[in-house]
Amino acid sequence: MIRLATWIVTALLLGPCSGAFANAPATVDPALKAALIEAIAEADSFDDRFDAEVWLLDMSTRMRHYLPDERERLHFLRQVHSQATRAGLKPDLVLAVIHVESLFDRYALSRVGAQGVMQVMPFWKKELGRPEDNLIDLATNLRYGCTILKYYLNLEKGNLRRALGRYNGSLGSHRYPDKVQDYWYRYWYVKD
């Protein structure tokens, strides 16, 4: 799914840009930059193997329509679970964001250059001094996207609607947060 809004989130949240569709903001939030650096440095793993396996089976059944190949689907879900858990996010919420952002297309590319399942802007690679990072790589894209979403959730003191608005660049509009929350509860929500 192509989104102009992905660029707008960059412009609104990270500072003014030098042009209408600049690749990098004039200033970058240093706390968000630090969170991304830390996330990239950490290894991914499941905290509780049994819970992860139960989650994988449940989500795999729900996701069959979107990723028909079981092996690809399980790899995708393991990565989502790992990166979401590492960031302190609910994996099912991350699935809802991905559903809205890219419809699970790891090769998604927006007209403004946002890449991958979570539609991450590539200026982050340069900003972090990691030009070799591949945002189409599932684990890399999820690590960046989950870290950014968690940062906005913390910034908004747990207000998910505002954090989703920031992530999408639509802070103040209800359309994107409503859509993510609708997809979350309709397709992916797992009761604690």
Image (cartoon, rainbow, N blue to C red):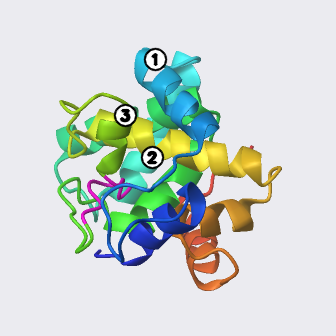
Q: Earlier in the sequence, mark 1 or mark 3?
A: 1
Q: How many marks?
A: 3
Task: State how far apart marks 1 and 3 are (Cα).
Answer: 9 Å
Q: Which region of the structure is painted magenta? A: 113-121
* Quarter assignment of residue 114: bottom left
The residue at the point 78 percent across, 55 percent down is 156
**Does the magenta segment cover residue 119?**
yes
**Residue under label 3:** 79
On the image, the x and y values in percent for residue 69 come to: 16, 49
Q: Residues within 10 Å of mark 2 (few under 14, many from 20)?
A: many
Residue at 70% x, 50% y is: 153
Residue 128 position by quadrant: top left
The three-letter code of the residue at mark 2 reads Gly
Per the rendering, the mark at residue 45 is 1
Q: Amino acid at mark 1?
A: Ser
Cβ–Cβ under 8 Å for marks 1 and 2: no
Q: Nearer the viewer, residue 16 or 107?
A: 16
